[in-house]
Image (tube, grey):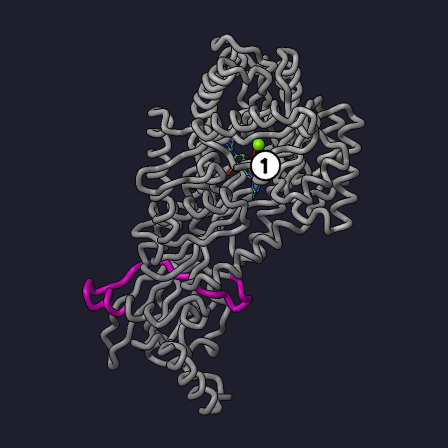
Amino acid sequence: MRLQQQVMRVIGRWRGAGRTRPRQATDLDAVVAHYAIGAVLCTDQGVIRAANHHFETLTGFSRDELVDLPAPVLRSGLYNSSLLDGVLSGVAQHGFWQGRLYSRHKSGRLLAEHLTICRYQGDEPLLLSLVGVSHQEAVSAAVEQQGVRMLDPLTGLLDRPGFYAELEQCCSHGMPFGLLSLDLKNFCQINTQFDHHTGDVLLQQLADRLRLLVGSRELIGRVGGDGFALLLPGLSDELQLEEWAQQVLRELHRAFDVGPRKLRLSGTLAGALWPRDGEDHHQLLRHADVALFEARRQLRDYFCFSSQMLERIAHRERMQKELMAAISGDAIELAYQPIWDNRLGRVAKLEALARWTHPEWGVISPVEFIPLAEQSGLIQALGEKLLARACQDLKRLQAAGYDWLQISINRSTLEFNTLNPDGCDWLDVIHDHGLSPSAFIFEITESIFMDGHEDHLQRIRALRAAGSMIAIDDFGTGFSALNYLRLYPMDLVKIDRSFVQQIPGNIQDRLLLKGLIDIVHNLGMQLVVEGIEREEQQAFICSQDCAYTQGYLFSKPLAWPDLMSYLQHHLAATQRDAARVGSPILAI
Ligand code: C2E
Ligand code: MG
Ligand code: MG
């Protein structure tokens, strides 16, 4: 603010003076004239008193547009008042200040100035500022000297070492700036779907768009195959950084013309602010990576780093450790939710649902810890233990006389994707317990099929050939659900509870559910409607001749002892009332 006021005051004075006559050469002009690089003399407030010809060429401003005005670097809008304070204290402490600052050329494009500033002892105390060649020239010179080491040959942007060196420089100045890190989504698919040339052209076009947006190639790096990073001098505010991020995303999402094709890209962006978000450039980069990881994890386009993010990550890391201990210590239990056979009037299947009760945090939902297990590579170990536990429980159930019961066990996408194509990882566990695979239903979700991988079909065939059933869980919540029924052989469809919530009141939901039930039955598959909570929902489903229902109306998921009393109670009731088929006995 103070700097802006000073600038306005000086501009006002300059205008007020009504200067129309060309300036006369002064002694100060003679001082700067003999330097072979840009040289200016200015006051402690940064107002230029004299500038040489090289400085004019460098900045695009004539001497008349420079003298008696704040230096272009102060007018660029990139720095706040702390810039002058930093320079003056450097000069006072060491006798000179050296560093790189960004300024604007008269044309508006960004210009990296290498500056050396020291005191000039003349009639009046002034600062002499020597301005080196623009950074681009420096880069080109470095490239000539060292071979192509600082520029990425494909895009002409800085390469990773070049960008990191630039970042380090900027951090050493102590001036605020923003860092944006861009990671393209599924870029390797472009290379495989089309060819590498198409991928290259896309990257070049994107680089051009970023360059136009930022105004300078010196501030953009291609820091990975499909990763870019942008340095935005003068930014000190999250909102400003977000505005930049939105502009970058807009450029990214605009269609690219590659030959006859129009292609689209998408990506994830992360932001961090210097000096707020790091103690050095390494930490700043790490924190930008943290924000990128969080954005990807939460399927967001953009995230700016915050210290709360670190707290959440620390908590998640601790949770990961605890989860690992819970898995190896067999502390993850199974609860069973009955699936009712409405035709036979008895429990037909039990859905096995994972339960984690932490001594300090209490009950943690599988919705929270299953994705955590996936992210930390623990899901296979957890899945195997849970399957083994389900096998032991099924043996106990069979021994207690419940030999018709099937266990329906959930398998997450990653678990299914990493199962060997012949399914032996799971089938072996079942066989090892002396059980038949036909007593098991594997519940998978539609998201498994999103990548259209051939192996899925093999896995499904192998498990079915062994006698197990494959169920599609939460049916209707993803995209193209019906299409998957056409493409993949399934035995059972579990209709998501969102379809029954408004039943029977909502006529549209009623028609939709009726249609789904008809389709699934006509395809010869079994159908379970999930999330039945009220009598009228159950009555409607039964009126549609739907055999299987599951929900709190019958029972919540039950721990082992409760499951046994539930089954005993219902077995006795069913035997007592064998004639009343189709009206389940409700939970106690
Ligand atoms: P899901 O497979 O769709 O399981 C049904 C979820 O709905 C269960 O939540 C169950 O408690 C809840 N539910 C059942 N009936 C009703 C009802 O009438 N009303 C309402 N509001 N909810 C009902 P839960 O146990 O919290 O499990 C959530 C999800 O976590 C499961 O959804 C499943 O996708 C996943 N999950 C649970 N256990 C495992 C597991 O062992 N492995 C894997 N990979 N995923 C699991
Ligand atoms: Mg399920
Ligand atoms: Mg479900």
The residue sitting at 47% across, 45% down in the picture is 158
Estimate the x, y position of residue 319 in percent, counting from the top left: 36, 38
Estimate the x, y position of residue 101 in percent, counting from the top left: 39, 61
Q: Quadrant of ligand 1?
A: top right
Horizontally, is 154 left or right of 305 in the view? Answer: right
The residue sitting at 47% across, 88% down in the picture is 15
| 268 to 465, vertically: above or below | below
Residue 239 in the magenta stretch? The answer is no
| 328 to 282, vertically: above or below | above
What's the residue type where badge 1 is placed?
Leu
Horizontally, is 345 left or right of 19 in the view? Answer: right
**Front residue of this view, candidates 112 and 211:** 211
| 91 to 26, vertically: above or below | above
Q: Quadrant of residue 551?
A: top right
Q: In what element is the residue under mark 1? A: loop
The residue sitting at 51% across, 29% down in the picture is 566
Q: Rate crowding at label 1 as few (under 14), some (14 to 19) or many (20 or more) other CA atoms within 10 Å.
A: few
Residue 136 visible within the image? no
Estimate the x, y position of residue 510 in percent, counting from the top left: 76, 45
The residue sitting at 61% across, 22% down in the picture is 575
Q: Which residues are magenta?
A: 87-109
Mark 1, residue position? 586
